[in-house]
Amino acid sequence: MQENLINLSYLISAVLFIIGLKMMNSPKTARRGNFYSAFGMLIAICAALFEKGVVSYQFIIIGLVIGSAIGAFLAATVKMTQMPQMVGLLNGYGGLASTLVGIAEYARLYPNLSIYDTVTILSTIIIGAITFSGSVTAYGKLEGIVSGQPITYPLQKTLNLLQFFVIVCGSIFLVLHPENCIWFSVVVLVSFILGILLVLPIGGADMPVVVCLLNSYSGMAGCAAGFVLSNYCLIITGALVGASGIILTQIMCKAMNRSMTNVMFGAFGKVEAGSADKRQVTVQGYTPDDAVVVLESASLVIIVPGYGMAVAQAQNNTRELADLLEKKGAVVKYAIHPVAGRMPGHMNILLAEANVPYEKLYEMNDINSEFERADVALVIGANDVTNPAAKNNSKSPIYGMPILEVEKAKTVIFLKRSMAPGFAGIENELFLLPKTMMLFGDAKDTVVKLVNLLK
Amino acid sequence: MTFGEILIAVYIFVLAVFVGFEVISKVPPTLHTPLMSGSNAISGITVVGALIASGKNDMNLTTILGCLAIVFATINVVGGYAVTDRMLKMFKKK
């Protein structure tokens, strides 16, 4: 009877998770959806407390209190620009928790493990450990603790393959001899190391894809733990998260026109930066006064924000500029490229924080046809995502990447710190067009100047 | 686990993957960051496994590892949901 009630509760929480995710399809319902999902988690946790093996509560209470305090603290203090690191770190913790569950289960069943037990426990541990150490490395790269440059060294691929080989062979051996603690430890340890070494050669610019992929892995690790414990709730939710991570990974790869293999094993940034075209060009700089003249007479202004805007902390000033332009009768829209921030949808969050209404944010495919009608395309802290070379220069490293077609606007106002090329290390021919006005300097300073002049 | 029971688990897994793809692909790009942190929180469901592992009566390696797992999974759950709520609160209409 009790067992049936517990299983029924798990079913209810799984349904709540799915409904919660479904309500994420609109900003209007998303917050309530998140609440439903959290409620589902509460039900699952309560149900687990009534499982028949659970008789002692002191460790549980200690764990729950410490975890909740740390989690609440992290969530309340994290800056919106640090969101990729936060998600990366949380992914890692999820992965580590799954690994620990796997090891605990191994210790509990030792030495009488069936083939099924060994296979599922090893899957949980291997996926979970790679998720954890990979996420921590990605966190380090995003936070600047580890160099954002792709780190490469001789025999890198051979070494990674060797580790993979050790994990596979060790696992096969353990299926036949599950009581061998030494091999078990070796597999656990090598999995942790492999996670670090797989992420090290990936450049900082590609971390969004890595975080998405690790998000998927953390789901898969939970799913594997579900197979270990024969818990359907874990299997369902793990599969949902796994699917979500994979979808986002695909979206990111498509937005950069790169295959997943290329992101994971390409060490892209390192090779291309050296071969960049270093010809000398002189670009005429304009002053904010010149730009204001154009902005004042504009009836449709499309703002193209990039991560440079967030780095300069110019979101609020940009919104102020947009408000002023709207007061003067202009229509202002924001064009958001899928890789505008450091993770999918990151730019939307940064703008939402600056009180930009979400209806004014347009996706690339929806806004590209509107640039023709736009009087001004105002590019703030973005570069590669506007570079026409992606369309017309087959030699360019970003060739084939979908871009925001700002070159179709009547005037392009480009706010840029200096003439340094963007992430991909390539020149942007937009700078040379007669209709482009380059405003050099810190994005925030320039936007403030524009705001003051417009007032 | 008998073969039949394993098969049922696999059934559920496969169907859940399809549901996941169906539901997630309808989420607009504007909400992709909250989607990631929210689904991240859901992946903290491992806490259920951790609870079962650490609730045993006697203190041994299993309960200690289970307790550690609870800490990390709870950070994942509480942090994930709280930060998602913080972000979604910011989404406003005109």
Image: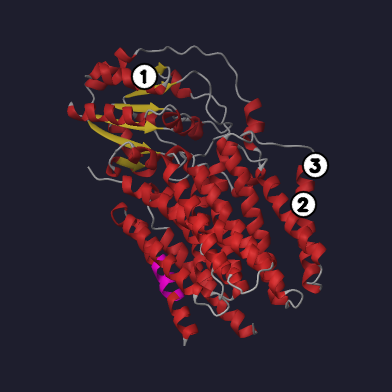
- Decide which of tag 1 and tag 2 comes sooner along the chain: 2
Pointer 3 residue = A155
Q: Is residue A154 above or below residue A225?
A: above
- Give the amino acid type for the residue marked by disc 2 in the picture: Leu
- The reply, left or right, for residue B40 in relation to residue A27 is right
- The reply, left or right, for residue A378 in relation to residue B62 is left
Residue A41: image x %, image y %? 44, 65
Chain ID, mark 3:
A
- The reply, left or right, for residue A208 in relation to residue B33 is right
Q: Between A378 and A432, which is closer to the camera in this rendering?
A: A378
Q: In the image, which residues are magenta?
A: A10-17
Most common secondary structure along the magenta stretch: helix
Q: Element at badge 2? A: helix
Q: Is residue A12 magenta?
A: yes
- Decide which of tag 1 and tag 3 comes sooner along the chain: 3
Identify the residue shown where x is 50% and y is 18%.
A419
- Decide which of tag 3 and tag 2 comes sooner along the chain: 3
- Give the amino acid type for the residue marked by disc 1 in the picture: Thr
Q: Are marks 3 and 2 on the same chain?
A: yes
Q: Is residue A329 visible?
A: no
Indicate the quadrant containing the C terminus of chain A: top left, top right, bottom left or bottom right. Answer: top left
Residue A94: image x %, image y %? 56, 57
Q: Are marks 1 and 2 on the same chain?
A: yes
Pointer 1 residue = A446
- The disc label shown at residue A262, or none: none
Residue A243: image x %, image y %? 51, 61
Q: Element at badge 1? A: helix
Give neighbour class at mark 2: few <14, some 14-19, many 20+ (Cα, 10 Å).
Answer: few
Pointer 2 residue = A161
